[in-house]
Image (spheres, rainbow, N blue to C red):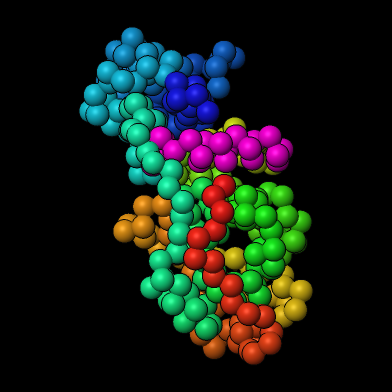
Amino acid sequence: MNDRTELSEFLKSRRARLRPQDVGLRDYGGTRRVAGLRREELARLAGVSIAHYTRLEQGRGDSVSDEILDAVGAALRLDSDELTYLHRIARPPLACAAGDAAVPESLRHLLESFVMTPALVVGRHTQIVGWNQLAVAVFGDFPALPARRRTLSHLLFTEPHLRELLGAGWERAAREQVGHLRVLLGRYRGDSGLAAHVGHLLELSADFARMWAEHPVARLRSRTYVLHHPVVGELTLHGELIALPDEPACCGLDLFAAEPGSASERALRKLASPGAAGSAVVPARPSPL
């Protein structure tokens, strides 16, 4: 989790995925000593000196201008999430108070009002800090987990139940979570708890370590999951993570919905019926990670 190493490895990973022909350079054949573009090829594409780019790839981005970062990002064909991440990790981290994620009273009432919508409040360490009863009925008894392991990351990488629930879609969902974690790490670089969370997962899960080494960077957006639920069978849900800018310790409100009139909506209605999901449990202040 060293800042210089992260910047260096991120740039190398993005340079390695480009071939000369991808960016309009002639490939003269033969064996190339490096995967992807050479440093000098990338520097030439970006219109910067090889010395400037070499310093950047060595993790020394403090003195590099935003314009150079933009030029390097364009040469590497970074998308908007990756470019934002590059700008953040190239700069010294700002102080970032950890703060315990807590669910405000008004948000707790909102969670409880979502009768047909599984809903979670997620902290910036991917902690599940709030939920409604339908989320428990759909995703399992995660409230029974110790607070330190009650995170989306732990559910995906250490809980067999969620892997079974996602089936063939587990790999994509897990990779999305890793990319999202990297976005959070760039956004909250001064949060030592978040860095510790990532370090813990690297030790805990070989799958997480494998995906993390690939340096995915992508914000969670709209996505669709096909779940294999033990009670109602196949369940297709559309997820949306809604930012909570006024709650800095919380990453967002994660909502899931079924297509109106679909078999999945009928399945959700069955899970939401009285007695099917148990009592709603929404803690006001969970234990910190």
Q: Nearer the viewer, residue 66 or 112?
A: 112
Looking at the magenta stretch, what is its main secondary structure? helix
In the image, residue 203 sits, relative to residue 246, either above or below, namely above
Q: Quadrant of residue 92?
A: top left
Percent of width and height locating residue 77: 38, 36
Percent of width and height locating residue 196: 56, 36
- Specify start and end residues of the magenta stretch as a single range: 187-206
Q: Quadrant of residue 159?
A: bottom right
Q: Nearer the viewer, residue 64 or 117?
A: 117
Percent of width and height locating residue 54: 39, 13
Tell whether 202 sits left or right of 224: right
Tell whether 17 sits left or right of 204: left
Residue at the spot x=51%, y=48% of the render? 125
Residue at the spot x=44%, y=38% of the render? 191
Residue at the spot x=28%, y=20% of the render? 64
In the image, residue 150 sits, relative to residue 190, either above or below, namely below
